[in-house]
């Protein structure tokens, strides 16, 4: 009978092709937004942050307070985009709302998770905007270098960890949270992140090799912490993938788990060096 027929098996390599096409499209969109800067990049960061919170709320919800998750998503979308003009106010508003959701746990025990999600999704979005450079005209050239540097370190770390872990293997990094991750992968990712970061600085015509190697190492470690953090959250709620929005890849959170933490760390480093000046310069122009 027709109802008993099984769907045809997936052709070998079709999943890989889908993953590659999706990766190329995502990379093209990201590069275009990064190069454009200004309001275009702010919109890109805002949409990405909102999608992260959407997936976070689906993982940690449902929430009994009506529309609270949707309101939080709109808040993060608007706040990250508004950071192009006033990042301090964006951070203050999101912090206040996140704290309010934590204090409102009497209405719903799950609400504190939404507050954590606002910070997890919103703060890295603002960090990305300030690293690229605030203002409507696209930010400076050093801001472009700073955001590319951060992205490259995270991508290289992820790739290096994957290939080193698969080829070398060995003791697990944190088997309870992420059974596939190994110490060899973590070290391979660190080495790849440092190498890619220094190469990016060299190609940009800067000479801050030693300091950039140290910063790349810090961002690589934070990127791997972010990866483990997302794995811990998914394990806590019994979820395999954060979503299905990206064909062949899963959810947005699955692709940016390391990036969100690395962006926040990069912005903090830049801020600590400039005291609120040009954050991108504080990260890469030592």
Image (spheres, grey):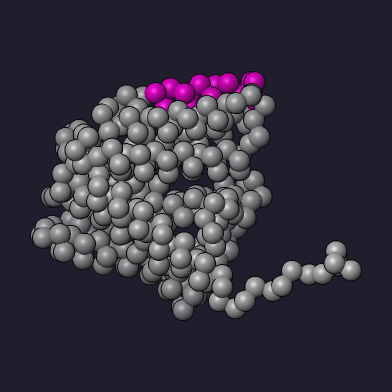
- The residue lying at 58 percent from left, 21 percent from top is 104
The answer to which of 136 and 157 lies nearer the viewer is 136
Res 278 quadrant in image: top left
* Position of residue 138 in the picture relative to residue 226 (left or right): left
Q: Is residue 206 above or below residue 277?
A: below
In percent of width and height, residue 29 lies at: 36, 53
Residue closest to the far right? 1
* Position of residue 95 in the picture relative to residue 100 (left or right): left
In percent of width and height, residue 207 lies at: 10, 60
Q: Is residue 220 above or below residue 41?
A: below
* Position of residue 12 in the picture relative to residue 261 (left or right): right
Name the dominant secondary structure of the magenta segment.
Answer: helix
User: Does 97 appear in magenta?
Assistant: yes
Q: Is residue 168 above or below residue 99?
A: below
* Res 163 visible: yes
In percent of width and height, residue 213 lies at: 22, 60
- The residue lying at 34 percent from left, 46 percent from top is 263
- The residue lying at 64 percent from left, 30 percent from top is 63
In percent of width and height, residue 106 lies at: 64, 20
* Res 190 visible: no
* Position of residue 70 in the picture relative to residue 276 (left or right): right
All told, the count of numbered labels is 0
User: Does 65 appear in magenta?
Assistant: no
Q: Which residues are magenta?
A: 93-108
The answer to which of 221 and 205 lies nearer the viewer is 205
Quadrant where the N terminus is found in the figure:
bottom right
């Amino acid at each position: 009978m027709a109802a008993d027929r099984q769907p045809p098996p997936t052709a070998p390599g079709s999943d890989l092709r889908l993953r590659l096409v999706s990766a190329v499209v995502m990379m093209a969109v990201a590069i275009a937004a990064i190069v454009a800067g200004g309001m275009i990049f702010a919109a890109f960061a805002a949409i990405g942050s909102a999608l992260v919170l959407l997936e976070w709320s689906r993982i940690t919800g449902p929430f009994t307070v009506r529309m609270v998750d949707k309101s939080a998503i709109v808040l993060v979308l608007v706040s990250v985009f508004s950071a192009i003009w006033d990042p301090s106010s964006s951070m203050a508003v999101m912090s206040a709302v996140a704290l309010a959701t934590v204090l409102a746990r009497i209405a719903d025990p799950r609400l504190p998770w939404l507050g954590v999600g606002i910070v997890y999704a919103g703060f890295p979005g603002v960090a990305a905007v300030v690293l690229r450079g605030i203002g409507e005209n696209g930010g400076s050239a050093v801001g472009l270098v700073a955001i590319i540097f951060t992205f490259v370190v995270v991508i290289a770390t992820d790739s290096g960890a994957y290939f080193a872990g698969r080829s070398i293997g060995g003791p697990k990094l944190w088997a309870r949270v992420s059974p596939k991750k190994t110490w060899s992968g973590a070290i391979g990712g660190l080495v790849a992140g440092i190498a890619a970061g220094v190469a990016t600085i060299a190609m940009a015509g800067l000479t801050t090799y030693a300091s950039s190697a140290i910063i790349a190492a810090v961002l690589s470690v934070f990127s791997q912490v972010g990866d483990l953090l997302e794995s811990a959250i998914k394990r806590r709620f019994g979820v395999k993938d954060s979503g299905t929005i990206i064909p062949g890849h899963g959810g947005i959170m699955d692709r940016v788990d390391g990036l969100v933490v690395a962006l926040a760390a990069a912005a903090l480093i830049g801020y600590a060096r400039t005291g609120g000046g040009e954050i991108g310069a504080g990260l890469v122009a030592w």
